[in-house]
Amino acid sequence: NKMSGAEIRERFLSFFEERGHSRLPSSSLVPEDPTVLLTIAGMLQFKPVFLGQVPRKVPTATTTQKCVRTNDIENVGVTARHHTFFEMLGNFSFGDYFKKEAIGYAWDLSTRVFSLPADRVWVSVYEEDEEALTIWRDVVGVPPERIKKMGAADNFWASGPTGPCGPCSELYFDFHPEQGTAESVTLEDDSRFIEFYNIVFMELNRDAAGKLEPLAAKNIDTGMGLERMAQILQGVPNNYETDLIFPIVQRAAQLAGIDYHAADPLTKTALKVIGDHTRAVTYLISDGVTPSNIGRGYIVRRLLRRVVMKGRLLGIRTQFTSKVAEVAVSLSAACDPQVAAQAQRIYDVLALEEGAFSATLERGQKILEELLAKAAVSKVLSGPDAFLLYDTFGFPLELTQELAEQQGIQVDTVGFSSEMEAQRQRSKDSREDVDLTATVNLSELVQAAGPTTFTGYEALKEASHKD
Ligand code: ATP
Ligand code: MG
Ligand code: MG
Ligand code: MG
């Protein structure tokens, strides 16, 4: 009798409602806050309250917040626990309760509402936060060997370089208690532990000069990953196989003619990427973001192109993204009732973008075949050739590599990189050096690149008009 995702969400929200919290709606993925591109946490809609810029409307609140984190894009389908889009459940105190109550709530919720065995929950505290440590040990009664002190990188939370922040304390679930509680055990071992809940003691503000000042009030900001709690309670090996996401992944598998459970790890990863990214773009488009070459629109474009590319690599030959998105829409009601009403528009946006990118890929593929024929003897596709495909035909390097490898041909990626570097030198502030499938932090990239255009595709469009 496993708890469904919907039930987990509802139990979390009603637990806090029963304790006086106002249940408030999720805010849009497009934040009002101009300093961040997308909503990355539940606290964002409350930032002005934490900063004391606007008066609190209620003393305490609980939400389930739609979030997108592009910094986790490379983790998708690779770790068991990271998505681009996920739901963050949260309880918030605006100068009302603080550390002791917040820790008590998190413990009761985890062990009573979700029935996690007490001896399988570990906690981390910020190394300088003796108060939190004492509460966990002496008030809650967690044995000291299951409380780990961690440094600022993990246990000092901030929504960005400036703004409200503070020490935090995180709860982890132990999948392998039989491995014991030796001093050497680390919560970073993700084959054993999963972080599921973070309590931020939001009592500081970092200003533009980097200086920390106390906020007017001591606040609580928390985040519990819905998909992660579902993974724990449903006893599945990763977030993707929970009822919140697996039907989307399964639709992708079905369209590719693949049996998910029999598939090899790389194929599973590709299916998870398709499921995750399609879910993300479904919600992003619903919130009004459409594919473009800048800012948020570029994030949607990049996510979608990764979906199309993975689909190709799995052998899907027809337009498929809107068929996968149908499942994401069908699962969206309890998280975001707006999505279903936007369904047709979402499918239309997907079809248009997928069509354009597929045409690009088709052209590139013809050129690639010629280049591969040329490389048949040397068994190496040169850097300049791979770069030509990428730069002129918008053909992602990852795809070039996969297709070349199928014919036993290696791609000279070092040569590719030096071509890329040469290009970068030629056009320092241009967008042409942005690999749509590159392994770089996307939000950094979008910010760094600014509002310029990716002329590779424009040139291509012009070329095809002339045909
Ligand atoms: P991790 O260390 O696993 O990357 P985090 O410390 O970056 O997580 P927080 O910023 O503390 O995460 O966010 C609060 C909670 O939101 C986490 O405890 C987790 O349950 C959930 N969460 C964070 N990032 C993701 C993600 N990319 N996908 C799914 N859930 C997430
Ligand atoms: Mg993280
Ligand atoms: Mg963490
Ligand atoms: Mg955390």
Image: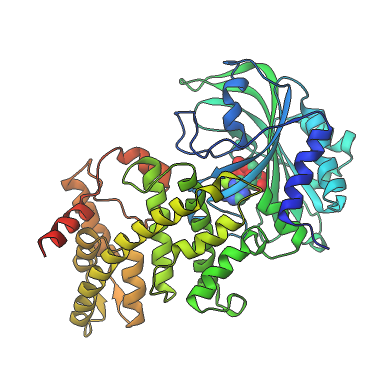
Name above or below for residue 299 compared with residue 320.
above
Quarter location, residue 384:
bottom left
Task: Give the total number of marks visible in the rendering.
Answer: 0
Q: Quadrant of the C terminus?
A: bottom left
Q: Could you tell me which residue is drawn at 56 percent across and 78 percent down?
A: 263
In the rendered image, the residue lying farthest to the bottom is 377
Residue 85 image offset from top left, x and y in percent: 55, 50
Q: Position of residue 49 (x, y in %)?
A: 61, 21
**Horizontal and vertical percent position of residue 56:** 66, 18
Q: Nearer the viewer, residue 439 or 291?
A: 291
Q: Position of residue 43 (x, y in %)?
A: 61, 32
Q: Is residue 146 left or right of residue 376?
A: right
| Residue in view at x 46 percent, y 61 percent | 322
Q: Is residue 253 left or right of residue 461?
A: right
Residue occupying image coordinates x 57% and y 63%: 248
Let me know if residue 164 appears in the view: yes
On screen, 38 above or below 466?
above
The quarter of the image holding the N terminus is bottom right
Answer yes or no: is residue 186 visible.
no
Which of these two is toward me, 337 or 353? 337
Q: Quadrant of residue 363?
A: bottom left
Q: Quadrant of residue 406?
A: bottom left
Colour setting: rainbow
Residue closest to the eye, 453 or 132:
453
Q: Is residue 465 above or below residue 18?
A: below
Q: Is 316 placed left or right of 293 in the picture?
A: right
